[in-house]
Amino acid sequence: MKHIGLFFGSFNPIHVGHLIVANSMLELTDIDEVWFVVSPQNPLKERQTLLADHHRMQMVRVAIDDNYKMRACDVEMHLPIPSYTVVTLAHLSEQHPDKRFSLIIGGDNLENFRRWRNYEYILEHYDLYVYPRPGCHPEDELANHPHVHMVDVPMMDISSSYIRKQIEEGHPPRYMLTEPVFNYLTEMHFYEKKK
């Protein structure tokens, strides 16, 4: 049974930090493939700075185009909004009974995991692969749960919001993005300050 790590996010935009996490999960765990699940709306985040779904999907596609172990997944764009991870997991498990799904999340998400809808069900039925985030110290009870796996991934203090801010201020964050993503958002003038 192929083991799929689901990496959820708005990917607004996808950056090298995301790719380093995904690649580390492939190298350091038993995950066979990483699917980047591009979320149309996170119930815990505001939508105002979110690029259109198809643009964020395209940036993920061009970012991972040369890696056959990574895939862009638009499943949440066909499910009710707002998106809830427990619903997406149930849908994917039903659609792909030949695959085993796990979640890839940051330590910041583990700290807030009890706020997720039906988090107990997720913990009982799925594994969580957790990468460290600066300043995050998940509680011992969750971090030591048998379905939670702390993975020693290089800690990257890069965020999509920082990248958007740099672009808006006229400072292109050239090396925080892969060249295809950088070229795509530059050509489309994404995140630039409106003149």
Image (cartoon, rainbow, N blue to C red):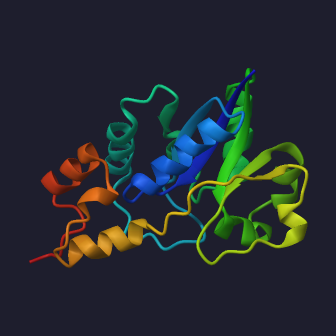
Q: Quadrant of the N terminus?
A: top right
Left of 34 or right of it: where is 28? right
Does residue 110 appear to the left or right of 5 in the view shown?
Answer: right
| Residue at image location 53% in from the left, 41% down from the top | 23
Q: Residue at x 32, y 38 (%)?
A: 62
Q: Where does the C terminus fall, quadrant-wise?
A: bottom left
Residue 79 in view of the camera: no
Q: Quadrant of residue 112?
A: bottom right
Q: Position of residue 129 (x, y in %)?
A: 72, 50
Q: Residue at x 69, y 47 (%)?
A: 103
Residue nearer the viewer, 3 or 92? 3
162 left or right of 31?
Answer: left
Residue 143 in view, yes or no: yes
Where is residue 33, by image quadrant?
Answer: top right
Depth check: 163 or 78 in front? 163
* Residue 139 on image: x %, y %: 83, 73
Who's the residue at 57% across and 37% down the image?
34
- Measured from the top left, where is residue 176 in percent x and y? 33, 59
* Total numbered labels: 0
Q: Is residue 131 above or below residue 37?
A: below
Residue 157 horizontal/vertical position (percent):
48, 69
